[in-house]
Amino acid sequence: MAHMYIFGTIFFTVYGQLVIKWRIPNYGHLPEEMMAKMVFLLKLFLDPFILSGFLSAFVASLCWMAAMTKFELSYAYPFMGLTFVLVFVASVFLFAESVTIYKVLGLALIVLGIIIASRG
């Protein structure tokens, strides 16, 4: 059950990243002028889906605090590397982002690092 806290942290972190990326293009680019920039960011923040992404980050933090009561940081933290892998895979399917050999090799190194770190 304790590993569910780590899983919750990963899940809510990935959800937040994906939903924010999904919604941001609906608003265009960040304006240059300061006042327009503030209005733009306020509109983003008031978007219910983007707000759910921020809430998701908060829930991920709660899960992480619970995980820290059960595991050593040096054991639990490498699992956070899975967020890179999951966001990459989801972004390829959801947003048609590019897959390059460098990205795949980098992710393979992350997974290898997680496997090695979780053994100790």
Image (tube, rainbow, N blue to C red):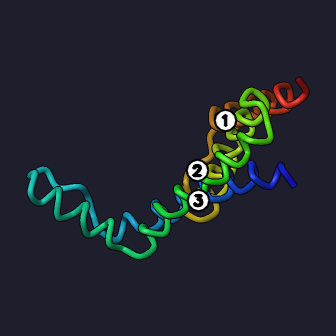
Measured in 3D between alpha carbons, the distance from the residue under mark 1 to the one under mark 2, in whole angstroms, is: 32 Å
Q: Is residue 25 left or right of residue 76?
A: left
Q: Earlier in the sequence, mark 1 or mark 3?
A: 3
Q: Amino acid at mark 3?
A: Val
Measured in 3D between alpha carbons, the distance from the residue under mark 1 to the one under mark 3, in whole angstroms, is: 34 Å
State if disc 3 and disc 2 touch (CB < 8 Å). Answer: yes
- Residue at (53, 56) in percent of width and height: 57
Q: Amino acid at mark 2?
A: Ser
- Residue most toward the bottom? 48
Q: Establish if 69 lies above or below 119.
A: below
State if disc 3 and disc 1 touch (CB < 8 Å). Answer: no
State the mark number for residue 61. Answer: 2
Q: Amino acid at mark 1?
A: Ile
State the mark number for residue 59. Answer: 3
Label 2 crowd (10 A; few <14 / some 14-19 / many >=20): some
Q: Is residue 56 left or right of residue 113?
A: left
Give the image location of residue 31, x and y in percent.
Answer: 17, 55
State the mark number for residue 84. Answer: none
